[in-house]
Amino acid sequence: MNPTIITLIVLAIMVVFFVTNKFPLGLVSMAGAILLGCMGIIDKSDVFASFSGSTIALLAAMMIIGQSLFYTGVADKMAHMLVKITGTSEKGIMIAAVLVALILSSICSGLGVVAMMLPIVVAMSMQAKVSVSRQLIPMSFAASIGCNLTLVGAASNVSTAGLIEDMGVDFLSFFELGKVGLPLCILFLVYFLSIGKKLLTPGDSSDPEYLKEYTRREKATEFNPVKGGICLTILAAVLIAMAVASDEWPMYFIAAIGCVLLIGTGCISEKEAMRAVDWPTLFIVGGMSAVSKAMASSGAGDLIANAVVRILGNHPNKVMFLFFVLLVTIILTNMMMNTSTVVLVTPLFVPVAMEMGINPVAIGVAICVAASAPFLTPVGSGTNTLIIKPGNLGFRDFFVPGIGLTVVTLIGSLLLIPVFWPL
């Protein structure tokens, strides 16, 4: 059978498993890559080549660095300090939760941020006698959109960067994604403190008995001033170094140095560092990187590119193509994991953009932003799933405020991306 057809059939089967979530996503990614290797579509060595690459190293290192903020109690201390400023009214708690989530998710796993903040926000809301369920949605959404403040804010950002650079395209430096990420975060704040707040489900749907048990079970890590100071110093040094990273001192190498220093100084134990690494995510990225190579070598990528050209025309409107990329990525990220989404769409859309003479960096940015917009469903992100039980939340609770935020993100991206990265 034609290698192109084989690759597309394997990819289609993988998409079905991704969407239905019948099997672990890492297993699906690696199984697809191994199958393509067995059938000779790619060399067997290519199946595991990405595991020795810089993308995997950067992902793992940033997961460890982010976890050190929780291990030393720095994240918890930051949350409590901000609450003293904003107060304990419903709006005050919401502002505090959202701001902390936005800031921390720029360098930490959004899932880790929500896991750390959840017991704090629940306890604060119960003490202030305000709705618990109404506080959790904005916090979860903030942990997703805040990932756009830096290139390492989400595994999906790093994955997109790695895949694009594998295609020979220079992507973004550490803070460049913040050119569009910061304005989107500001739009997010304006939206939720005005329209979005009114669209949250009235009342409190949470179960009081469950929350009492939950707050007793979940205890935040006690702040250690010495370790906290060392952790913040190392983190600041890593961020500054990443901001001026070069070919001689790449980001993944700087992040690795930061990990060694954090473990060596006791800011995080070796055991906790290993636990901080989300291994399924690494297998998803590694497996899909191999599938991406198969898409290129088999001609499947060119076939899809030609199909898109036929749909949009030989000379499509560049803004229309950008809208198409944003919309498709947003729809997919609300059905499957954001990392799975980007490793699926990046090898499809970026080559098409290059074929059409559209700036591939702008398309990469669009993919990063759209993949961090899981605002429509409870299963769009682990951050959403984590708050379902404590808030006793349903589909409507996410979709109604989420549809407005999705429109804001879509319009904001369409306006901002071409300004900083002309199409």
Image (tube, rainbow, N blue to C red):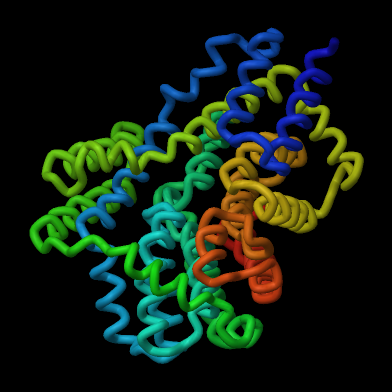
| 324 displayed left or right of 207 | right
Say how many tags the image has.
Answer: 0
Q: Is residue 216 visible?
A: yes
Residue 222, by quadrant, is: bottom left
The quarter holding residue 218 reads bottom left
| Residue located 13% across and 39% down the image | 264
Q: Residue at x 74, y 18 (%)?
A: 298
- Closer to the camera in the image, 400 or 360: 400
User: Quick one: which residue is furthest to the left in this view?
Assistant: 226
Q: Quadrant of residue 205?
A: bottom right
- Counting from the top left corner in percent of width and height, residue 368 is at 57, 51
Quarter of the picture containing the N terminus is top right
| Residue 240 appears left or right of 278 | left
Foreground residue, 46 or 63?
63
Residue 248 appears left or right of 39: left
Examine the rendering and report whether any part of residue 411 can be seen. no
x and y percentages locating residue 8 in the rendered image: 79, 26
The reply, left or right, for residue 143 in relation to residue 61 is right
Q: Position of residue 150 (x, y in %)?
A: 43, 55
Please determine whether, in this image, residue 103 is positioned above or below residue 380.
below
Residue at (66% x, 9% y) in the render: 38
Q: Residue 291: percent from the left, percent from the top?
A: 64, 25
Q: Residue at x 31, y 50 (%)?
A: 67
145 relative to 315, above or below: below
